Amino acid sequence: MTATTLYALAGIALFGLGLHALIVRAHLVARILALNVMGAGVFMFLIAVAARNETPDPVPHALVLTGIVVAVSATALALVLALRVQAVRGRAGLAEEESPDA
Amino acid sequence: MIPALDILLIVALLWLARQALVARDLFKGVVLFIAFGLLLALAWVRLRAPDIALAEAAIGSGLTGALFLSTLGRLRRMEREAGQAEPPPEDGRRGGWTGGFLTAAGTVLVTALLGWAVWALPAGAPGLGDAVQARLGESGVSHRVTAVLLNFRAYDTLLEVGVLLVAIVAVWAVARADFPFVTRNAEAGSVPPQQTALVNLLVPVMLVVAGYLLWIGATAPGGAFQAGAVLGGAGVLLLLSRPHWAVLPERRWMRTGLAAGLLVFLGVGLALVIAGRRLLEYPAGWAGALILLIEAAVTLSIGLTLTLLFLGGRPAAGDPAPTMTHTNQQP
């Protein structure tokens, strides 16, 4: 096994860790954090695959670079929406996860 | 043989991610996530991706962390105002033990399948590196990642700049800036003198670094994204140290600045279409100059967008902005 394969597998593991937290955590901020870890896992997989060649493949690099900027802007929007949920509902969680008249 | 440093780095990354995600205290989780982002930048260096490392250090850990922290500050304030003594307990085991087991089993299954797919990847796939190398001479720049971003796949980058503009428009549509907890000292003008001195020192350096990154992107790791991220960081530092009306440009300039990247990018593309070429098909000899023009505008827009995303809402017209005094946004 080479170091790049190990990084690629670590990326998958990060994705799995994030996916689990995305499902079990109820707080929206924790879920947005989980999505960011999942994203980091995807980025790590792409960069590890790009690093298998003698000179790293620049196309996944460009992809991840745009991905990082898109991820931060999506995170900002998600956090603002989570604050709206908190303002309207009194807690930053989703509706279907509580009793109907809570 | 895998270097010990890589193994150590990967173990630390997985451990930090796990700890950040299971932390009941969200503040602790966010701080661990910031540490995770910094180590991630190291991993990018190990994977020979210096462009990504630069962007990750500035955005992935820095700005994303700042966004999370200011959100937590706002959440606490809202909870206090609503009379909640402490945040409502979060049930970590929804669905009981059966649900917990099924979730864990399902996640492990998905992860194992993905891991198997990675393991089974054919070795020695050439990728697109050779194709990029073959046409690099025509791209107008000599750094391969910049050539992909602003020439070969300029279309993707154009759309991505559009996504950034949509994000800030959506944030402004949802919320008005309510000046988060973390900037309350800045708004009140009661920032410690040490912080003011540090920011006065750092911000000019960051502006120079941003300019350097923008210029060097043609030949070495760097470019509009990294430069814009550094500008965004400088903007956030200023928002933490000065009242917002002393930092942000006037409304019409702010809006122009936010849209400048997309407008210049589209403008260049359309001008080329009118000239009888395809969208963003640069004429020979002009590619370098056009790329620099687009990158300069995109840098400005990314910097301003990231700064304003940190504010978390639309700065309202009625804010106490003594319009006569803010002649200069730099210190």
Image (cartoon, coloured by chain):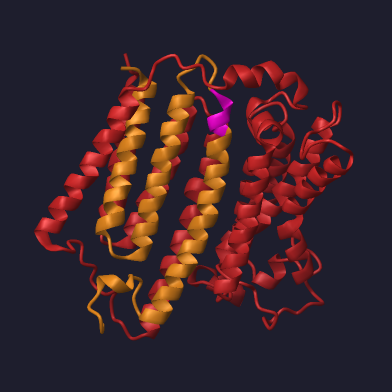
Chain identifier, red in the render: B
Residue sitting nearer the eye, B234 or A99: A99
The location of residue A73, given as percent across then percent down, is: 55, 55
Q: Within the magenta stretch, is there residue B325?
A: no
Going 47% across and 62% down the picture, which residue do you hit? A78
Q: Colour of chain A?
A: orange
Check the picture and name the quadrant holding the C terminus of chain B.
bottom right
* Residue with the most extreme left position: B97
How many numbered callouts? 0
Going 77% across and 22% down the picture, which residue do you hit? B138
Toward which corner of the image does residue A102 lie, by quadrant?
A: bottom left
Tell me the magenta residue range. A57-61
Apparent side of residue B21 relative to residue B250 in the rendered image (left or right): left
Residue sitting nearer the eye, B161 or B65: B161
Apparent side of residue B76 relative to residue B19 in the rendered image (left or right): right
Check the picture and name the quadrant holding the N terminus of chain B.
top left
Toward which corner of the image does residue B200 lie, by quadrant?
A: bottom right
Q: Is residue B205 above or below residue A73?
A: above
The location of residue B154, given as percent across then percent down, is: 69, 38
The location of residue B328, given as percent across then percent down, is: 79, 64
Q: Main secondary structure of the magenta part?
A: helix
Going 46% across and 17% down the picture, which residue do you hit? B125
The location of residue B133, given as percent across then percent down, is: 65, 18
Q: Is residue B17 visible?
A: yes
